[in-house]
Amino acid sequence: MTQLTIQQAFDLAVQHDQAGRLHDAEQFYRQILARQPEHPDALHNLGVIAHQMGRNDLAMDLIRRALTLNPNHAEAHGNLGIMLRDRGLLDEAIAAFRQAIALNPSHAQAHSNLGNALKDKGQLDEAIVVYRQAVALTRNDAGAYYNLGNALKANGQLDQAIAAFRQAIRLKPDLAEAHLNLGNALKANGQPNDAIAAYRLAVRFKPDFVEAHNNLGVVLEIAGRPDEAIASCQHAIRLNPDYADAHYNLGLALEHNGQPAKAIAAYRQAIGLKPDFAEAHGNLGNALKGAAQFEDAIAAYRQAIRLKPDYPEMHSNLGIALRELGRLDEAIIAYRQAIRLKPELAEAHNNLSLALLARGDFQQGWEEYKWRWKCKDFTSPAPNFAQPQWDGRPLEARTILLRAEQGFGDALQTIRYLPLVARRGAGSIIIECHAELERLFRMMSGKCRIVARGQPLPAFEFHCPLLSLPLIFGTNSANIPNEAPYLHADADDARRWQHRLAEHSPRVNVGLVWAGRPTHIDDRNRSIKLARLAPLGQLPGVSFFSLQKGDAAAEAKCPPAGMELIDWTEELEDFADTAGLIANLDLVIAVDTAVVHLAGAMGKPVWTLLPFVADWRWLLERDDSPWYPSMRLFRQPSKGDWDGVITRVAEALPLWIKNRGSDHR
């Protein structure tokens, strides 16, 4: 048989190579090299086959030998670059790709590969330039647009990335990876519904695309569709039970869907698969905190911080959990660390302010409290006026607007500063407040104009939120303006209720409030059921009057056994009505709601029932309040121990009744 020429053998080897018959191709290339050891193309092609078979050291050696023989072999430089990039030798890979392009400027794949290496190295601007050159060389290559989109997204150029991915999809509609990354870019660009559509196409073209199912779950949760989010994450987990990210995202969806126990289990599963998953430890902490498992939450946060010490949000969340257990000094340390790591983290500043105020460190506390406006979940809108916010300077007969920015209790507490503002030379004062407070505040000073929230405001020259006044006036525990009463009932209202209560004399008349608004951030800690007050009903000579509003008011229809509870709350349309009734009571006993502020502002004896970790304004470990001289505080001795509080109240009430003529405490 006639022996094949070198060229014939090479042509046959290439045919086998292109047909995927790598072993046959390898045999022919080796036969060529046995006859002609310095055949550069055979060396190069054999090197490519070795790389495809995972024999990378041999592959690089063969291609380098080919380049020694033919330094102008553009494709060999390009393939050497691919192997160098696979090994993480990015600088050498970039040099190889640049040499391939220098030898063949129209080599589109070399441009794309150079772009990949530059992107790996973090040189995104250069990578984008190179990818654009690849796109210009081959207008119909979906992969080139796909690579360009990835670089643009990584560089934060989301609109351009979206356009590049869409072009890749136009060229190759079934390119599932392009649909996936289009969805990622749309999600990052704040277009969750469009992202959902992109992810759904990704899984349509590639039903087992685990990452797409997972990311679809993430964006469905963002879009407020938790049931669908849960289903998508569970689908991803069925496809890959060891996919830690899917378990983590399932936890997020379950938590936001009000299934904390299942969320905790999902986070623990993610951590079991990926023990160094700092975010999973952190969100496990959040779920445990939400389930009131604070010790476990603290442990989870500390583990997240050990794994990722520069995780400011976790330091802040650790502070919240520590505060829930009354460990205020440790909480302050955690908040300060969060701020050191991220000085603009508003939530950490705000939480620090509340902890400092609770500890009585008013100077720093009021200063930090200015950050409340920047918190994402802050319920009151930030001031948005053309006029400047007042900083305490003399007003020189100009008009100032005082705004009740937050809840009823906050407004009732801080309206006490009105005379101090007037003494700074205000020409006139406008008070914007809740409609329920309008009539009550009008009785405080006839010189002020009271405007219900939402109504048009008169002209003014300065504005100031009421809760910024303590900072302006340098309030500390020694100089709180606490002269009471500073709020009064309307005389006609008081007389009307006096006639109604006459039939209960000479009994002691006590007002009760047992619950606040369910939407309050701390309501689960401060509110109780009326039934818990049952021990008070056993005291002789006492008539109780409901001051309870809202859904909890219905409990007054079935008071505890033995308790005489009169309920006229349907007639209480605003706080002025409530003030009229309180004016005729002997004592108010209430959980931490607006009513305790109203009673305290009226100088009425008021007993405030507090959770173990109380709101900042009640300070720490004291049974009196510098804000309200007529107030007595009853604190939980341990977290959740309302029975201990009620027992002490039931023991104190007969003594108070006995001594009330001489001691209103």
Image (spheres, rainbow, N blue to C red):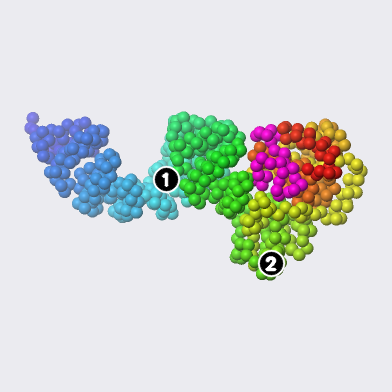
Image quadrant where one finds the C terminus: top right
Q: Position of residue 121 (x, y in %)?
A: 32, 47
Which residue is pictured at 58% across the width and 46% down the height?
351
Q: Is residue 472 left or right of residue 142?
A: right
Q: Is residue 433 left or right of residue 316?
A: right
Please, what is the three-letter code of the amino acid marked with disc 1? Asn
Rendered view: 625 above or below 540: below
Residue 551: quadrant of the picture: top right
Q: Is residue 587 left or right of residue 395?
A: right
Q: Nearer the viewer, mark 1 or mark 2?
A: 2
Residue 51: quadrant of the picture: top left
Rendered view: 269 above or below 328: above
Which residue is pictured at 61% across the width and 38% down the height?
326
Q: What is the distance, in whole Å, between disc 1 and disc 2 at their CAs?
A: 62 Å
Rendered view: 70 above or below 483: above
Q: Position of residue 603 (x, y in %)?
A: 78, 50
Mark 1 Cα shell of 10 Å, populated few (<14), some (14-19), many (≥20): many
**Prevalent SS, magenta region:** loop
Q: Position of residue 402 (x, y in %)?
A: 68, 60
Nearer to me, 46 or 1: 46
Mark 2 Cα shell of 10 Å, populated few (<14), some (14-19), many (≥20): some
Q: Is residue 629 magenta?
A: yes
Q: Which span of residues is magenta-colored?
A: 615-642
Q: Determine the residue located farthest toward the bottom in the rendered image.
A: 397
Which residue is pictured at 53% across the width and 31% down the height?
265
Please, what is the three-letter code of the amino acid marked with disc 2? Gly
Q: Is residue 104 visible?
A: no
Residue 619: quadrant of the picture: top right
**Label 1, on which residue?**
181
Residue 425 is labelled as 2
Q: Is residue 10 left or right of residue 276?
A: left
